[in-house]
Amino acid sequence: MQTTPTKSGSVKMILPLLVLGAYWLLLINQLRIEWTVNAQYSYGWAVPFLCLYLLWRRIQNSEFRIQNSGSEAPARPSFILYLLCALLALAYAPTRLILEATPEWRVMHWALALEVLGITLCVLRLASESAIRNPQSAIGPPHPPSPTFNLRNFAFPIGFFLVAVPWLRPIEMPVIDGLTRGNVAVTIEVLNWLSVPAVQHGNVIEVSTGVVGIDEACSGIRSFQATLMISLFLGELYRLTVLRRVVLCFVGFALSFVFNVGRTGLLSWVAARDGVGAIAKWHDPAGIAILVGCFSGLWAIGVWFKHRAAGAGSAAPGVSSVSTSLLRSLSSFILHPSSLRLTPLLLALGAWFLLAEAGTEAWFRSHESRSAGDIQWNVNTKQIAQLPAAEQLSVPPANREILRYTEGCKWAWHGEDNTRWQMMYFYWSPGRIWVKSVTGHPPYGCLMALGWKLVAKQGVREFEIGNLKLGFQVYTFEANGELVQVYYCLWEEGVKVQPAFSRNFSQWERLKSALEGRRNPAIRILEIAVWGARDQHDAEVAVQRQLQDIIAVETAHSSP
């Protein structure tokens, strides 16, 4: 016999969607920064919808039906689930506080994602236990008896969301750098085999007409993570065995690498034949082609695996039915009338969410309201234009799209002591939270990708310009057989003790940002490279002299 919830019960049945939906929307809002500014993770916008689709397909499967078994279900260890849910909820509050100050910290992205996924699975498991213990009603139309609900049925569709969480940088950077260099190395061999002279410099390719940089023939490795996501999705969609899912992931990796080599080779060949400027015409079509080709090949292999599997399931339901069936399926299972006994837990989770969000906002607002005045500075471009051989360089469009700075410039000039200089300066106005996603790593990764060899990290040097003190992280590189000294400064307004750039290299500094109530301040980045200095001391003396000329300082007063 199937029961119908009362009007009051129907209202309460919306509670799980409201509470869990709030946690999930907050998680998606935190990850959207990476999905927006980092092309490698732009596929993340599709992942929540794919998760819902996979969950709907699982619910439609008979193993999700909870039927009256004719006997009372055995007792379950609900206390452990309640305790785990409480611990995850408690951990949510400090995670949110830290993320508000350091939205680029991927460790906290993973912490938040695991907390939200854990809370969701705990609630669903408790709801299912509640339904099993209440044999007075059934979900869905009558059908033959089916196996008891198992948490693993929910685990993959919900856990699939983790593919949209950016990889930790200590894992991501070596993998991407290795794949990129391998891509370039294979491309060089193919070009030479085709009688197109080419030389590798780090992650760029030099052909007869110039250098094909990572902006023009970007390694294409950005499709690697998307290919992994599609491989896992197809494996679940076609209910492949674990072994075939693993094989599908490796096949996706191979297809991604092969198509990326083809793209890089094509753009390099175009540059060698028609000049580097001709790449712009082929850049986007080549990128779209490899994505379509890679995903189409992967899909075909997934279908082939499905047909070879013994007892393969029926085809996926029509897409047109998803919009009308998804919420009905979710509500019939997750929002079972017997789950109303979870109302106290859901109310507690909802109240804790509101308290954590209100507390986080109050913490930062209280610190912002009493923040002290700060010294302001800027780059004096008029003075730079008067330096010997001064030339304003253009920032590549791809870089402008990624950085999204408020103001920025790039200059090159010569020093009176036969030194050569290059400077990049970027400014982000307060509140532009995505800036921390593009400033959350040191600059040497990009320079090494250009073929520069990191010789040494020289530590921190502080330079005084009037009453302003600027701290720079100093690197020594070797580029084309010549030593280059690189000085990098990241400045946060409102920080009493600079250099603020250290926050990007220290976990403690990130935590300190949260404890001091600093979030989304105005940020300036100044990077100076000098060629031709005899030694480190001469380079520092020259930098001090140049900073006196190119930096304009003014004192900002506190707001009333």
Image (cartoon, rainbow, N blue to C red):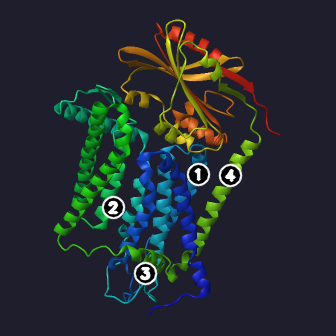
Q: Label 1 near label 4: C-beta < 8 Å? A: no
Q: Earlier in the sequence, mark 4 or mark 2?
A: 2
**Quadrant of the rendering where the N terminus is positioned:** bottom left
Task: Identify the amino acid type marked 3.
Answer: Ile
Residue where numbered disc 1 is placed: 96
Q: Residues within 10 Å of mark 1 (few under 14, many from 20)?
A: many
Q: Nearer the viewer, mark 2 or mark 3?
A: 2
Q: Amino acid at mark 1?
A: Arg
Choose the circle earlier in sequence order: 2 or 3: 3
State the separation of the CA atoms marked 2 and 3.
30 Å
- SS class, disc 2: helix
- For the question of whether residue 426 can be seen, the reply is no
Q: Residue furthest front?
A: 274
Residue neighbourhood size for the residue with mark 4, other residues' Cα within 10 Å, grouped as few (<14), some (14–19), many (≥20): some
What residue would you read off at disc 2? 233
Q: Which residue occupies the foreground of this view, 541 or 39?
A: 39
